[in-house]
Amino acid sequence: MLPFALSLTAGILILIGGTTGWIWMSGGLEHWGHMPFGMMDDWEHSWEDTMHGIGFTDASFMVFSIIGLSSGILILLGSSMLYARPKEHVAWGIVIVIFSALSLFGMGGFILGAALGLAGGILAIIWRPS
């Protein structure tokens, strides 16, 4: 069942991406992933200043992480239901496609998760269960 496998993998990747974003932002940019010995201090601060300068705050990145986490959970639910209730494949495929596209706001599971989710959801919609 290729649609199930693709969607399940997508949900896991998107959940990992959302969790990574949540952990990163909960400590602030300067506390997580900081390079030792100040090797990247200038780059880290210029990136943070640029993002804040165009209107992104730490709170907006937390919202993106919540979108990623929620999307990952709902894609996992959709893929599980696709496996458990294959006769409802169109409905669960639509859920997977919508939340895979929405996950792009929350890192999209490193983009790969969103791509796999979109592919799995589309395949679920056109799939003919036996």
Image (tube, rainbow, N blue to C red):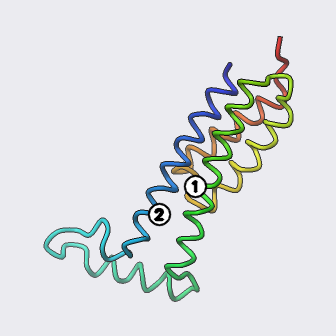
- In the displayed orientation, state which residue is furthest to the bottom: 53
Position of 68 relative to 51 (above/below): above
Q: Quadrant of residue 66?
A: bottom right
Residue 70, quarter of the rendered image: bottom right
Q: Position of residue 105 (x, y in %)?
A: 63, 62
Q: Secondary structure at mark 2?
A: helix
Residue pictured at 73% horizontal, 42% vertical: 96
Packing grade of label 1 (10 A; few <14, some 14-19, many >=20) is many
Q: Is residue 35 above or below residue 42?
A: above
Q: Nearer the viewer, residue 62 or 56?
A: 62
Please report contact status of discs 1 and 2: CB closer than 8 Å, yes or no.
Answer: yes
Number of marks drawn: 2
Q: Residues within 10 Å of mark 2 (few under 14, many from 20)?
A: many
Q: Residue at x 70, y 33 (%)?
A: 120
Left or right position of 15 against 3: left
- Residue to which mark 1 is pinned: 69
Asked whether 70 or 52 is in front, the reply is: 70
Q: Amino acid at mark 1?
A: Leu
Residue 100 is tagged as none
Q: Quadrant of the C terminus?
A: top right
Secondary structure state at the residue bearing disc 1: helix
Q: In which quadrant is the N terminus drawn?
A: top right
The picture places residue 51, in percent across and down from the top left corner, at: 50, 80
The part of the image, by quadrant, that contains residue 126 is: top right
Look at label 2 and name its amino acid. Answer: Trp
Decide if residue 94 is on the left or right side of residue 105. right
Q: Is residue 112 above or below residue 24?
A: above
Q: CA distance from mark 1 to mark 2?
A: 9 Å
Residue on which the image places disc 2 = 22
Image coordinates of residue 72 in percent, x first then y, are 61, 48
Please name the residue shown 22% across and 68% down the image: 35
